[in-house]
Image (cartoon, rainbow, N blue to C red):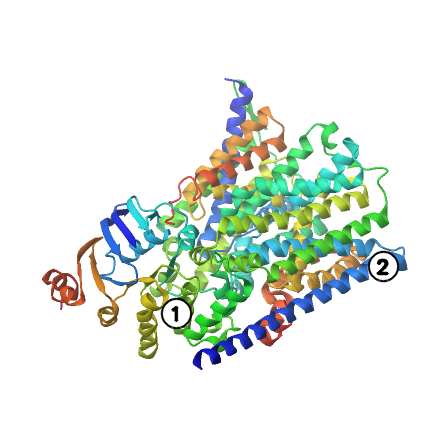
Amino acid sequence: MNALLIQGLLNGLILGAIYGLVGLGLNIIYGVLRVVNFAHGEFLVLGAYFAWVMLSVFGINPFIALPLAFIAFFAVGYGLYFLLVPRLARSDDPETSSLLLMFGVSIALGAAMLLVFDADARTLDVPVEPVFLTFGEIVLPTIRLIALGIAVALVAVLAWFLYRTQVGKALRAFIMNRDAVSLVGINAKRLSAFAFGLGIGLAAATGVIVSMVFPSFSPFMGNDYTLIGFVIIVLGGLGHPVGALLGALIYGITEQVAVVYLNPSMATALGFSLMIAVIFVRPSGLLGQRQLS
Amino acid sequence: MQVHASEAAHIRHRQQDQGVDRLRYRVAALLFLFLVAGMAALPLATGQISFAFYLMLWIAMATGMNICVGFTGYLPFGYVVFYGVGAYATGICYRIAGLPILPSLLAAGAAGLLIALLMAPTLRLKGVYFGIVSLGLATIVRLGIANLPDHYTGGSMGLILSGANSPVQSFYAMLAVMALALWVVLWLSRSRLGRQLRAIKDDPGAAACVGINVPSVRLKAWLLAALIPALAGGVEAWYTNVVDPEYSFHVLVTAKSIIYGMAGGFGTIIGPVVGTMALYGIDHLIWERFPLLNLLLLGLIIIALMLFLPRGVVGSLLRRKPQLRRYIA
Amino acid sequence: MLKVRNLKKRFGGLQALRGIDLDVPARAILGVIGMNGSGKTTMLNCINGIYRADSGSIELDGQPLAGRPIHEVAALGIGRTFQVPRVFQHMTLLDNMDVAQVASQASDAERNEQSAYWLDKVGLLALRYNYAEELSGGQQKLVELARIMVARPKLILLDEPFAGVNPQLALQLINLIAEIPVQHDCSVVLVSHDLTSIYQLSHHIVVMNEGAILTQGSADTVRSDPAVIEAYLGA
């Protein structure tokens, strides 16, 4: 097989893992809160900037910055929940309202980043030895493989958390039946805030990974990631985390293989077309349940 | 005896009912008439028509968005696609096909309708999915246009419609577009189609059960809603002489249409007009003095609106004082 | 007038309707009773087009209904109310009436006349400018009934019209429903748990159980049928 193609496949895997994390975060927030987090991408980019600031100002390398980012943004998310979400629940159409509200948040965050960091693209220089790993004809930056490893580890940790811990199980219960949860004595508000924090923290952590994988990032990348996140969710089905992972892999591989043969923007267009096709063929996602009419 | 009494009562009721409807309609129609007349007279009084031009553009855009959101119940995050396609249709027809400006503008409308028709299958999607697909489609169109061969669309640098510059004429063209938009919502507010739309927005299942052909009615509204931004985009291209993928498909076009409309309130036809007039001035002022802050403030305004005034100024007013419903359409 | 033959519907592993045969003559009231889950609402949903039956036929005056979209079934003359009234909350009562006459070729004046007539009949004419959401649940049930009648239907399907309704309102509803067949040339299929009202109103009663018709007949027949007593009326 073509070496470029294999490289594209591997890149697709790595990106798929990253997109998967984005999709997971979005799914948790939607599943628990029924909030469509249109600003997810912006939090991701904020995570990338966090890593950059940690490195250039404090000299802390991104491997340590990652858990720090998660904790910091978890706290931000937790607080934001109480600020933003309870009012939404009172509106006529909470889902649409959340969509609009987070749309506003995304614009505000993007603009704030622009103000603070300027439009210049930043790069994160992570000293890793060796810089490249070679497998026959295939050359991969080491940092990408490490990022893949971290992403997979994150997914594993998340899975462990959701299936093995009390809080995680409560979260899953909440996703399945929002009303019943309060009946069994769980504080729905705190759980929701926790979920929001988790989602935002995850976004920021993913942002740190992104800063390691990609040569540069800028304030307006957020939009693209949010859109991709939604593509993933649509592919996998809103509320189905495993489907999101599957969708992410498919999307990542499709996009990266397409990049080998087409130019990047056409590859993106192809990815979105895939999403639209899936929506029409399987409206509840690749793994979602068929709804009764 | 009994029959006569109830018949008389019904006739009285009928006249009363028509009276109430007429009042709201007349108030709105009068307001719109003043607006159009005022704008029409403006170029005769001053040469500074740019502010008014864009005010009319945004009133039209917010009104078009109102048809989508307020009447039909959709949040088209890719709304800008109609605007961009309209702009490009005009640009291509004028610059590349060499057509005169009027047919080029009509082509803008046709292009908008065509895209809307192509997007018709997405109308059966639920709110969230629809919004995302709409945005995805808009992105695909933008990327597609940017990647087409340069001699078709000007590529990523866009087109320049040199020689088309005629500010006053394009001003009146935009006035026509705004007037069209206002007329459409006036018509919708008292037409059968408008009522059917409101029923669908309220409860699509029940609407079908009373005999409303939901997909067909939605499509009609969607086509109307697409026509307005397409024409607006075409006229704006004429006014500025520039068409390019970044600018003609910018997410801010959708964002502002939503914000201005939301500020007034999508539930009424007066709301978005009021919202645009209130916010555009402020927005423009801030953009002139503090361009960097402008974007941030827009985002903060959306947040503030959604948290504190989700029904917009007019909508919240109606909530507090329902008796005003007699006057506000 | 309405002929249902061998209607079957399954949801995943559950056979909700096992081959239903039903005849509703013109100007009649058919009562449908049965335990929860017996398939009553599913049957209504199939008739009115909300569900697509897996097999079987549904004919209204010879016109096949199965497979048609909901609005076509409605336009052919079938009205439907729901257990929880689905009125258009953000529209006035008058608009609710008007929008239900979508298939009508009548003029504006005639439609307004019809709207006023039915609002008057349910005693809500004075509230005609109020938004439906401002009304109580019971009043909304009346609005829903008026709304389906305004379209001059041939057949109306009423799903639990007496559910959660106070006795005074129930009486009003019973009187309204009783006069529909003769005064408005329209048949009624009435699904309810309120046995007293069913016995009072229905010309004919159908008892459903687990997706099939257990028995049918007049009120007396049904009341004394041992199978019905065992399965439904029981203790």
Mark 2 crowdedness (10 Å alpha carbons): few <14, some 14-19, many ≥20: some
The reply to whether residue B299 is visible in this rendering is no
The reply to whether residue B48 is visible in this rendering is yes
Instruction: Give the quarter of the image for residue A104.
Output: bottom right
Residue B127 in picture, x, y percent from top left: 51, 52
Q: Residue at x 48, y 73 (%)?
A: C134
Q: Dot 2 falls on which chain?
A: B
The residue at which mark 1 appears reads as C141
Q: Dot 1 falls on which chain?
A: C
Distance between mark 1 and mark 2 Cα atoms: 54 Å
Residue C103 in picture, x, y percent from top left: 47, 56
Viewer-closest of C92 and C72? C72
Viewer-closest of A114 and B323? B323
Q: Is residue B265 above or below residue A15?
A: below
Q: Residue furthest left?
A: C226
Q: Residue at x 52, y 31 (%)?
A: A254
Residue B305 in picture, x, y percent from top left: 63, 63
Q: Residue at x 64, y 62 (%)?
A: B269
Q: Is residue A91 above or below residue A201?
A: below
Left/right placement of residue C89 relative to residue B112 reads left
Three-letter residue code for mark 1: Lys
Viewer-closest of A135 and B97? B97
The residue at which mark 2 appears reads as B42
Left/right placement of residue B146 relative to residue A166 reads right
Residue A49 in picture, x, y percent from top left: 63, 46
Three-letter residue code for mark 2: Leu
Q: Secondary structure at mark 2?
A: helix
Q: Secondary structure at mark 1?
A: helix
Mark 1 crowdedness (10 Å alpha carbons): few <14, some 14-19, many ≥20: many
* Labels 1 and 2 in the same subunit: no
